[in-house]
Image: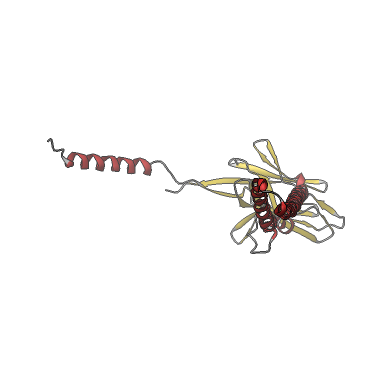
Amino acid sequence: MKIKSTNAFSWRSLSLGLFAAIFLSACYTPKAVIRVEPDNEDVRWQYGQAFARQQSHDVEVQAAYNGMNREYLFFDVEIINYGEEEVLVDPSRFFLDVNGFKRRAIDPEAFLLGLDMDASKREANSKNTAIALGVVAVAATAAIIVAADNNSSGNNASANNTNNLGQDINNISLATEVVSIFPSLVVDLSANNQGGELPPPNPKDRDFWTDFTLRKTTLRENERVTGKVLFPLTELTDHFKMVMPVASGTFRLQFKRMLHQPK
């Protein structure tokens, strides 16, 4: 019998392992860290966040980049009215100008309407499902009563009805199972509405849009409004503008993108 050497096998396995380790280590490189700051001299810093600032007549606007997720770009915005006339602030008119391409801000009022409409549809679907299950339960209960009645009537019948009695017993068992699981099905439908620990704020939650975003607001003299303005995720260039039409003026805030590549 020919004996195989294990040395060749061991060196071959070690070589393959080292090659795989080197190959896998070369597959991933650190992503560049993005920072966005105002591209002008009029900057106000607040806890490490740089706000671009611009004033025209009696209106002052400030905006700072606040980050991004997989869907949106976030900006913190503040608008102040120093004049006697009322000023309407409507974030749905804001947009980003990236190399001439306009990316309009998300309208909080339209987004909230969409969330409420979706919630209404889900509620209606849950109620319809509950009604359908209720009909099934009623039918199952009726089947139990009929089967029990047939069973009692069959006591006086001849022995030829033995097969029918067995079928009735099966019907009773099936109906009983349906009725027994009906309450658990109804509970499952309302499980999503049970109270519990609230998740952290995110753009999918209604409370985020009501409490954190910049809403459509009429400013009187010496009033200000602050909040987050969201834009659909887009690839930013080294230089871009945030354009905010307010009252009779249009504010164009310059920003610059900086990429920091980890070494």
Residue 192: horizontal and vertical position, in percent?
A: 67, 57
In the current view of this chain or complex, which residue is farthest to the front? 158
Residue 101 vs 80, above or below: the answer is above
Q: Which image quadrant is residue 29 in?
A: top left
Q: Residue at x 67, y 55 (%)?
A: 176
Q: How is the image coloured?
A: secondary structure
Count of numbered marks: 0
Image location (x, y in percent) of residue 212 = 70, 57
* Residue 153 seen anywhere in this rendered image of the structure: yes
- Quadrant where the N terminus lies? top left
Asked whether the viewer can see residue 54, the reply is no
Q: Which residue is the extreme one toward the left?
A: 1
| Front-most of residues 216 and 182 | 182
What residue occupies the far right of the structure in this picture?
A: 85
In the rendered image, the vertical position of residue 17 relative to residue 55, given as above or below: above
* Image-quadrant location for residue 233: top right
